[in-house]
Each structure stands twice: as C-alpha cells, then as structure tokens.
Image (cartoon, helix red, strand yellow):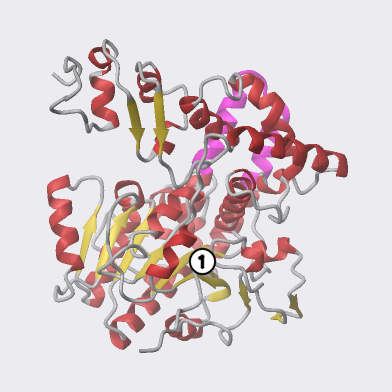
Amino acid sequence: NFLSQSGRRIPTPVLIISYETFRLHAPVLHKGSVGLILCDEGHRLKNSENQTYQALVQLNCPRRVLLSGTPIQNDLLEYFSLVHFVNMGLLGTAAEFRRHFEIPILRGRDADATEDEQKRGEEKLQELLMVVNRCIIRRTQALLTKYLPVKIEQVVCCKLTDSQRAVYCDFVTRKAHEVASRMNSARGDRADNVSLSSLASITHLKKLCNHPDLVYDKMASNADGFQNALSHFPVDYRGCLDSNAPFRPNLSGKFQVLDYILALIRTTTSDKVVLISNYTQTLDLFERLCQSRNYVYVRLDGTMTIKKRAKVVDRFNDPSSPEFIFMLSSKAGGCGLNLIGANRLVMFDPDWNPANDEQAMARVWRDGQKKDCFIYRLICTGTIEEKMLQRQAHKKALSSCVVDQQEEVERHFSLGDLRELFSFHSETVSDTHDRFKCRRCVNMVQVKPPPDDSDCNCDFSVWNHCYGKKHLRDIVLKSAWDTNSISFVFWHYSHEEQRTTV
C-alpha cells in the first residue's frame, strides 16, 4: 500500500521500519521508489558487505541521510562505507579509498611515523576533509552540556590480587613463548590455528581480570595455559558459578573496589547505580555480590523480552522504587536505554570498540537527569585491559582527526605497541600513563593541571592524573582508595558547573 500511493496528497507518506524488517521485505520495496530515506543509528551500515547495507543501497531513492553519533568505530573503511551510502562514488571504490587515503593517513598517525609520513598523512587528511565536508554536518555533545548536570568520568586502575597476579603472569609467559614459536613456523592452515588460539587466550585473560571464578573450570582441568593455576589459591577455593560455594569478592582487585564503592554509595548517598559488563557470567557474579550484601537489584540481558524491559526500566527510574542496582549486559542494553533513575555507572570491563563503551556510559547522563553523574571505568593495572584502553585511545584519536578535525591529537601509541597483548607490566601503576611520557607529572605528582579548554571527551593525556586520592573530586572514590586496590586514576569532567544567581 505504501509504494502504490501516488498523487499530490498521499495519505500515509512516511514508512517507519526497522533495519531487520526492511531486509525481510527488501524484494517488495525494491520494486518502487521513495523520495528520501533517513537512517537512524547510521553506524549500523558501517560494513558495506552485509545484507542490510546491500538491501538499503539497492533502494531506488535520490536522497539519503544517515544519523550517527559514532561514524568511526574501528577504522576508516567504515567511514568510507557511510559516505559511499549517501554519495556513491564520491570517494571512489573501497580499494581506491584504502590506497589513496586510509593507508597514508594511518601511517601518518602512527607514533613511529617519519616526518615525511606525518606530512603526507596530514595532506591526505586535509584532502579527505575537503571532499567529505560537502556532505557532512557534525554536532558534538558539547551542545548538550548547558542542559545537563556535570558528569565526572573516572578510569580506575585496579591492582590484581596476589592470586590473580600469579595466574596471569604464568599464563601470559606461556602464551607469549607459544605464539612466538608457532608464528615463526606457521605455514598454511596453521596460521589460522594460531589466530584462533590467540583469540581464545585473550578472552581467558579478560575473564581472569574480572574474577578467577570466570575461568575456574579451565584452572580445575589444567587447561592450556592454566597448568597448576589452582595452587595459587586457598586450598578450599571453589568457583561459585557451578556450585553452591560462597562468592569471594576478595579474590579480584576490581570486585574489591566495586564492593567498597557500592557500600559507600548505599550508606552515604541516595544514589542508584548501573553496573555494566560484556559478560553475562560477570552479571551472575554481580548477583551473588548483591545477594550477599542484601542489595535490591534488577538485571537486564539478552533473555529479557522488549515488553518486560520497558516495565523494568520504568520501575527502576521511579525515585520511590527500592531497586538500588541495575545490572546490564552491554550487548543487550548498551544502546537506547534511558536509566536516568541512576546517576552512578560502573563499566566493569572495557570493549575493544570505544563507541560501544561510549554508548553504554551514556545510559545515565542524558536528557532528564537532575543529579551530577559519576562514571567509574574499572581497568586492571598493567594487563590486557590497559592494552584495550590504549587501543580505544588510538581509535578515538582517528575519529577525532577525521570527523571532528582536531589537529592536536597526540601520537602516543605505535601500532606495534598495540600488538603487545601477551605481556604483563607488573611493576607499573598505569601502563597507559607510562606510555604518554607525561610532562605534566613529576615524581609521581601532577604538577600542571589539565588545559582550560579540555574535558572528558579529550585524550587521557590531558585528564587529571592521580597517583593518590588527594586530587580526586569524587568523595566515594576518595574513600575507596583506602582498599589499597587502586594504583592510579585518570579523571575529568564534562564541563564546569554553571553557577546561576536567582
């Protein structure tokens, strides 16, 4: 009916449809034509090879608009896909774009780039901007700050416990030797086996950083890399996920910090908290912790229906409801949810894609929020999680220079640095800060404050750098430092509080 309408006055001129439904009905929709297509969450079209992109690009439509807050999530080829969708041929083919723009720009952004490579990269960047600025309107979050309360974002580097540290160190030592030797001799299919083995090992390390319970079955079976791992734990230790064993938050540095933060928030404020993790098993551990501390909570993951989600969210946002904690799987609820009933949010583990973390952290700091917001991003010191944070910084720097045209994004990390996954910097308070070669800190003291025009959207190098609790603004985190589980904190705010007189 929608396509068959014609004339000057069309009764139903607008069709609202999801990406999934469009893909299902694409053969019918391709038979007609429309005047304008408007795609919200346009970054879903970042892959020009997927079925949704192919279905939409074949629609007979002269005007196309994409809306996206994160046009670059991983690499420049995603940016090409979005521009190509709205202006086909503007940047040539994907191969031409890669050769002409992506390769020289990335080489110029590398920390190890020569002066000539930096110059050529900058020239290609300016050339790219000249082309794409004809079809892009960019508005940043800075427009919203005058309407929202202050947000304080904090990256909290948490020390591994002694048991975690011993298991982590043994695992990465074995894997580093194994990968090096196998990569040297890899031929044909064996190269794929190395890659798959490395991916599995990365997942094990990320889970170990969260809590040893998440890899207990691997340790109990002396699985590859975890030989004799249980010898580093108390004799009576049992994982709680597949047994009735009590949950032990003291076996994880991040859980010790989380436990203390939640206790302080509960006893000293009326604030509610959102807990986010990439793993549903970590949500299981959150539940065990809440049950042992008698916290009232709700949980949302991929198993919950859309209808029930709306009811749970509305109830949590009601100030009079008893729920103290909202647990969220980042994959199930990272986008779209409005959780302004809480003003504190804990990102328990990082994602490789900075846009996913940004989306998840935006659940509480949004229209309708009345309280100052506090974001806690927990990272295990010296581990793969710091490598992920560094990888995020690299991707955000790429987005800043291409999309936001910021020229002073510093070249902190070489691509070689970012491949160094199987290592453990056991003596550092923050491997990320070490790599900045920070000139604002002397003898483990920040002597120069962040630039006046900086905020929490800027690079970590211009945030506040805290080796101790003295210069923290958040009272809760200040008190949590006494757990002796925190080694370092980066923090910054969204904007200075606007003081008005009545």
Determine if the magenta segment contains residue 185.
yes
On the image, which quarter does residue 302 sit in? top left
x then y, percent, for residue 420: 67, 47
**Pointer 1: what residue?**
163
Residue shown at 41%/33% (left/top)? Answer: 65
Which amino acid type corresponds to the residue marked 1 in the rendered image? Ser
Residue shown at 23%/73% (left/top)? Answer: 324
| Magenta range | 174-201
x then y, percent, for residue 376: 45, 69
- Dot 1: what SS? helix
**Which residue lies most toward the top here?**
31
Q: Is residue 326 left or right of residue 362?
A: left
On the image, which quarter does residue 293 sit in? bottom left
Q: Main secondary structure of the magenta part?
A: helix
Q: Residues within 10 Å of mark 1 (few under 14, many from 20)?
A: some
Do we see residue 37 in this rendering?
yes
Q: Quadrant of the N terminus?
A: top left
Determine if the magenta segment contains residue 412.
no
Residue shown at 24%/74% (left/top)? Answer: 292
Q: Quadrant of the C terminus?
A: bottom left
Q: Is residue 306 left or right of residue 80?
A: left
x then y, percent, for residue 285: 31, 62
